Structures are given as C-alpha cells and as structure tokens.
Image: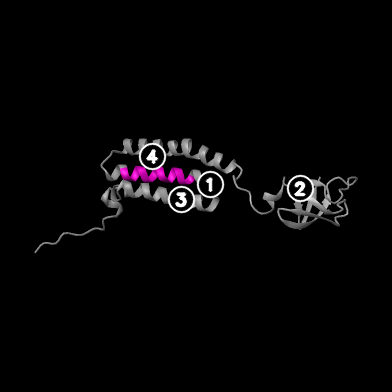
C-alpha cells in the first residue's frame, strides 16, 4: 500500500494565489462590507452607493460575467447612483419643510394686543387662540390694546412682535 504525502491546500508550495481559492463574488462582497463601515461611521451616503456598486459586481460574477464586465458593472452602478441619487438627496435636504409646527408655525402670524406691549416684555397678546406674553422688537415702539401686531419670533415663552 503506497501512500502519497499530503500537503495543505494553502501551503506556499502549491503555487496558487489566494485569490484563486476564493470566488471573485466573495471579494466583491468583502469590498461592499468594507465600504459600508465608513458609511456607518461618517454618515456619508456616497460610501453606500459605491457599496451597492460592489454588490452589483458580485452579482455579475455570480451570473458568470468576466472580470472586465464585473468592473464595468461596478463602475456604472456606482457612478449612476452618485450622479442621480446624490443630487436628489442634497435637494431634498435643502428644502424647507412644507408644514411648520410648534413655535415655527407661529412666526409671521398676526396677533391682537390685550395689554400694552413695549420692550419691557410685560404685555400680553392673543396669538392663535392663546394668550402669550409679548415684547416689542423695536425698543422705541409700544402697542396699545386692540392693535394688530405681527409675530417676528418666539423667545422662550415670549412673542417678539412688531
């Protein structure tokens, strides 16, 4: 009975590269995970878009595409996502919300003076059905009961009017 010596599959004498032992789609997924880490740490969506491109490269390999096709798909998907999705996300982030709520909804509204309002902050106004303390924006201006005023801002629990 003859026995042949056995060598480990990853020994340096096998003349195989490590990339020959692992399918390319696995490397693509490793790249996608590697790109996902800075996405989470920095909250930069561009890393996620390039990670999706790496997943597309993995899918291309799994479907039998060659290395050149994998790289082309990776680049095309990554560039398309960055070129199309990123501007939409930036535009969405810059838009003002359509519906203002809380004190933001009170700015710019009109109110009726109930007690004399000046810059001391001792006056009262009726704003959106509620009574608010108020002070004048202009230190030299005073508003008498019954006058209409515009709310410029809300400073704590005091409406600043003009």
Q: Disc 1 marks which residue? A: 44
- 151 sits left or right of 98 in the view: right
Q: Which mark is residue 151?
A: 2
Q: Nearer the viewer, residue 92 or 133?
A: 133
Whichever of callouts 4 and 1 sits on the residue coming sooner in the sequence is 1
Q: Disc 3 marks which residue? A: 36
- 142 sits left or right of 77 in the view: right
The percent coordinates of residue 115 (x first, y second) are 85, 55
Q: Principal SS element in the magenta part?
A: helix
Magenta region, residue range: 47-59
Q: Which mark is residue 74?
A: 4
Whichever of callouts 2 and 4 sits on the residue coming sooner in the sequence is 4
Label 3 element class: helix
Residue reaching furthest bottom?
1
CA–CA distance in space, label 3 to label 2: 47 Å
The percent coordinates of residue 155 (x first, y second) are 77, 54
Whichever of callouts 1 and 3 sits on the residue coming sooner in the sequence is 3
Whichever of callouts 4 and 3 sits on the residue coming sooner in the sequence is 3
Image point (76%, 58%), residue name: 131
Q: Is residue 50 magenta?
A: yes
The N terminus - image quarter: bottom left
Q: Nearer the viewer, residue 138 or 47?
A: 138
Image point (42%, 51%), residue name: 33
Image point (60%, 41%), residue name: 94
Whichever of callouts 3 and 2 sits on the residue coming sooner in the sequence is 3
Q: Nearer the viewer, residue 127 or 35?
A: 127
- Do residues under tags 3 and 2 come within 8 Å of each other at their CB atoms? no
Image point (29%, 55%), residue name: 11
The percent coordinates of residue 45 (x first, y second) are 50, 45
Whichever of callouts 1 and 2 sits on the residue coming sooner in the sequence is 1
Dot 1: within a 10 Å radius of its alpha carbon, few (fewer than 14), some, or many (20 or more) residues?
few
Vertical side of 143 occupied by 157: above or below: below
């Amino acid at each position: 009975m003859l026995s042949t010596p056995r060598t480990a599959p990853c020994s340096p004498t096998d003349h195989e590269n490590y990339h020959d032992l692992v399918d390319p789609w696995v490397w693509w997924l490793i790249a996608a995970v590697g790109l996902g880490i800075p996405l989470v740490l920095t909250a930069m969506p561009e890393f996620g878009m390039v990670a999706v491109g790496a997943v597309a490269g993995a899918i291309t390999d799994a479907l039998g595409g060659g290395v050149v096709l994998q790289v082309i798909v990776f680049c095309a998907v990554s560039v398309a996502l960055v070129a199309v999705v990123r501007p939409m996300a930036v535009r969405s982030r810059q838009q003002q919300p359509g519906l203002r709520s809380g004190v933001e909804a009170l700015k710019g509204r009109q109110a009726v003076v109930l007690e004399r309002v000046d810059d001391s902050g001792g006056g009262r106004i009726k704003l959106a059905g509620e009574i608010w303390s108020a002070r004048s924006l202009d230190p030299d201006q005073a508003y008498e009961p019954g006058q209409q005023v515009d709310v410029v801002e809300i400073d704590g629990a005091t409406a600043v009017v003009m």
